[in-house]
Image (tube, rainbow, N blue to C red):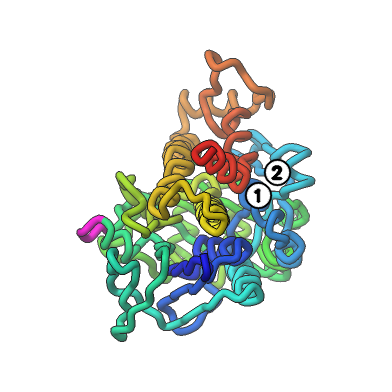
């Protein structure tokens, strides 16, 4: 192969940047097309679980991420009304040490990835709004009429994906999940000004704290090395149809969570503004690929955000695609190619499709776990959480909740996506 493969990635989110970084490390030529005029600080906190940090360790980015992160030592579930500790789950000593569970601000995460992509020679084009795709020519058309062609097109354009619509041949908007969330961040000084010993203790803990209750739950953790804190509170959706986000009314938010743990309600008094956003997902696609085009991340498998795995799955997708394309290029250079590009992309789909389906089901399971009304089922849930032994059970004695299922958690968090991609390639090509 005289020239390296050219990969055109549509979207500069976490998944698109992960694919770009991994592709450049495989020696591929990469251009990323992003519709916005400039990349700005968007979103709030985000979690990087071990299956994603393992990938960043392989690409030499752990130290950079640590500069802006806190390593979460555990995730705690607490009862909504009084903050009673129901369960505390760590990721395990080996994962903690080698592939930490980070909590980070999304803007910091994206900035680290953008800087690394540019350092590696990725071409990042802003104001590049993709309107259509030519499958035969493997190219995309921008709003200004320009055509960008490559050997492979990757649709990393998120929940409202244009490329998904083109692959399906119809509009495919995401569906409402029935939940919305309040989202905001606090400075450490704002929380310290509350003069609450209980809040101060919470701020000193390097962990994710969750309060679970009837139809709602709240998630709190540090970002920016503990200088800021992220809070997300899920509740039943009452936004009008078609409205994705809006500024929230703080008094209304406080009323929704009135009667919850006094520590949480105290934190709410530090809010100066809050955003309300509708949680959405998409039905599972029959295929993520068409010709030499593939989708990744929320463009093909968005799910409920109840496992901290949405962005991690996009990182896995990007790393797997890049690894397989790198192996394709190596084989072609040595004149021992066994697969076409289309078949190579199908390998990616075969590696991820059942996994993301399982994780989608896991998110639905967690939604049920978090939102039980008070009563006999909730009491039994709390008993089981408190009694968790963190040992693998025989198949016939599976845990009733995946949150405390050690086998499930190991499969999710201990996954080596890059290694699995290489093994799959070797199995198929011999």
- Identity of the residue drawn at 59% across and 45% down: 422
- Secondary structure of the residue carrying tag 1 is strand
Q: In this view, does 40 lie to the left or right of 153?
A: right
- Identity of the residue drawn at 67% across and 50% down: 54
Q: Is residue 137 left or right of residue 369?
A: left
Q: Name the residue under label 2.
A: 74
Residue 405 appearing in the image: yes
Q: From the viewer's side, name the closer residue of 339 and 82.
A: 339
Q: Is residue 6 on the magenta stretch?
A: no
Q: From the viewer's side, name the closer residue of 335 and 169.
A: 335
The image shows residue 56 at horizontal and vertical percentages of 67, 57
- Identity of the residue drawn at 57% across and 51% down: 219
Residue 311 appearing in the image: no
Look at the numbered discs 1 and 2 and tell me whether their residues touch, using CB distance below 8 Å.
yes
Mark toward the start of the polypeptide (1 vs 2): 2
Q: Name the residue under label 1.
A: 208
| Magenta segment boundaries in residue numbering | 168-172
């Amino acid at each position: 192969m005289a020239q390296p493969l050219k990969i055109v990635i549509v979207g500069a989110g976490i998944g698109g940047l992960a694919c770009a970084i991994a592709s450049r490390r495989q020696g591929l030529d990469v251009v990323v097309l992003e519709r916005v005029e400039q990349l700005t600080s968007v979103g709030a906190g985000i979690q990087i679980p071990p299956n994603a940090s393992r990938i960043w360790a392989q690409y030499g980015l752990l130290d950079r991420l640590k500069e802006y992160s806190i390593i979460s030592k555990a995730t705690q579930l607490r009862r909504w009304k009084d903050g009673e500790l129901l369960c505390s789950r760590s990721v395990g000593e080996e994962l903690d040490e080698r592939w930490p569970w980070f909590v980070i601000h999304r803007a910091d995460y994206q900035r680290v990835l953008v800087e690394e992509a540019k350092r590696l020679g990725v071409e990042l084009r802003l104001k590049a709004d993709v309107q259509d795709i030519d499958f035969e020519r493997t190219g995309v058309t921008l709003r200004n009429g320009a055509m960008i062609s490559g050997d492979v097109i990757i649709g990393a354009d998120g929940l409202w994906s244009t490329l998904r619509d083109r692959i399906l041949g119809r509009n495919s908007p995401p569906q409402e999940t029935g939940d919305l969330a309040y989202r905001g961040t606090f400075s450490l000084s704002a929380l310290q000004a509350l003069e609450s010993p209980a809040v101060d203790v919470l701020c000193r803990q390097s962990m994710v704290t969750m309060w679970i209750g009837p139809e709602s739950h709240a998630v709190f953790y540090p970002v920016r090395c503990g200088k800021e804190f992220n809070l997300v509170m899920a509740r039943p959706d009452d936004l009008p149809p078609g409205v994705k986000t809006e500024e929230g009314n703080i008094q209304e938010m406080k009323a929704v969570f009135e009667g919850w743990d006094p520590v949480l309600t105290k934190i709410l008094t530090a809010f100066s503004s809050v955003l309300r956003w509708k949680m959405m997902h998409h039905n599972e696609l029959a295929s993520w690929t068409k010709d030499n085009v593939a989708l990744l991340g929320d463009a093909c498998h968005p799910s409920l955000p109840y496992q901290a795995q949405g962005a991690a799955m996009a990182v896995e997708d990007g790393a797997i695609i890049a690894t397989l394309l790198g192996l394709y290029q190596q084989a072609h250079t040595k004149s021992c190619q066994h697969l076409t590009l289309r078949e190579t992309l199908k390998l990616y789909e075969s590696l991820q499709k059942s996994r993301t389906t399982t994780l989608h089901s896991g998110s639905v399971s967690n939604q049920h776990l978090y939102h039980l009304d008070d009563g006999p089922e909730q009491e039994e849930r709390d008993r089981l959480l408190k009694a968790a032994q963190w040992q693998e059970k025989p198949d016939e004695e599976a845990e009733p909740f995946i949150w405390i299922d050690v086998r499930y958690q190991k499969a999710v968090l201990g996954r080596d996506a890059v290694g699995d991609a290489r093994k799959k390639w070797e199995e198929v090509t011999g």
